[in-house]
Amino acid sequence: MFALNFNNTSMHIFYSKAALIAYLKTIKTANSTIGFVPTMGALHQGHLALMQRSLKENDDTVVSIFVNPTQFNNPEDLAKYPRTLEEDVKKMRTLSDKIILYAPSVEDIYEGNTVSQTFDFDGLENQMEGKFRPGHFNGVGTIVKRLFEIVTPTNAYFGEKDFQQLQIVKKMVEKTELPVNIVGCPIFREENQLAMSSRNERLTSQERKDASIIYKTLTEAKEIFQNNSPQETIQFVENSFKDNKEFELEYFVIADESTLLPIDQKENGKNYRAFIAVFVNSIRLIDTISLN
């Protein structure tokens, strides 16, 4: 364990799972609850909102900061992913000194065998992100399962920006019968409505400003979808990005919210969601919006 001091106060930080597990045993009671917020660091207001909710709803809150190599299929993206532990701790301390931080090394998590387990997520893994990032969700399932086994949380909090990931985690918990409640939380947005993401830190100020086009296009697509077909809505979005040299549309998909399968036509009583991935230079941004 390591206690990091700022202004004569300290916060519990653990770099080893053995030390974290031992500490959690000393504070757990039969009726106490642990909230857990897994992150890859470079914290923003969206992460802090998840932590605030956990602090409010649980006796203790654990946050992990770990850039997980097995969920990156692009080595350059992994290398460039922002790592800002000291700044992250300062941000967490604005909420509470009582947050327990787990900031492990790759060795502590994977013990010399940095590979993913293979999961069956009933096909959820084959759409959108899974189609464009092979193996990504095996990496996500592997790290989330390991973290749940280490932290043994009562409740775990995930943002809806990564809606597909949220559904994948719920499916993994269901299939592995881990006793944790998964809580999805609303997307936090910047002033220009760009979905908050650690990757936003890599954008120039002009790119960050111009990236408002992503959410603007999603909201326009939502309006179009009300009175038009899925194909016409998709065509509108593709045309919106076609003439924009700064942004490259990787995908825009309208899917059934529960199965994540793309739809050809609308049916009454079903919930639909739009998913988008856009490149700004080499920086990849994703967003989503409910269409109901």
Image (cartoon, rainbow, N blue to C red):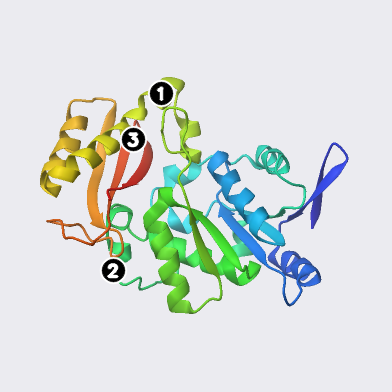
Between residue 211 and residue 40, name the one nearer to us. 211
* Residue 23 appears in the rendering: yes
Label 3 sits on what residue type?
A: Tyr
Q: CA distance from mark 1 to mark 2?
A: 36 Å
Quadrant in the picture for residue 172: bottom left
Check contact, mark 1 vs mark 2: CB within 8 A.
Answer: no
Q: Secondary structure at mark 3?
A: helix
Tell me residue 118's x, y (percent): 40, 72
Q: Residue furthest top?
A: 206
Q: Is residue 188 above or below residue 246?
A: below
The x and y percentages for residue 107 are 62, 61
Direction front: furthest residue? 269
Q: CA distance from mark 2 to mark 3?
A: 27 Å
Q: Image check: 183 left or right of 275? A: right
Disc 2 residue type (three-letter)? Gly
| Image location (x, y in percent) of residue 62 | 67, 58
* Residue in front for this viewpoint, 157 or 102: 157
From the viewer's perspective, is 151 left or right of 287?
right
**Residue annotated with mark 3:** 215
Q: Which residue is mark 1?
A: 209
State the image quarter where residue 155 is shown. bottom right
| Residue displayed at 36% across by 29% down | 212
Per the image, label 1 sits on a secondary structure element best described as helix
Q: Residue at x 15, y 56 (%)?
A: 266
Q: Nearer the viewer, residue 59 or 172?
A: 59
**Which quarter of the rendering shows the N terminus?**
bottom right
Amino acid type shown at disc 1: Lys
- In the depicted structure, whether residue 9 falls above or below residue 37: above
> Label 2's element?
loop
Residue under label 2: 123
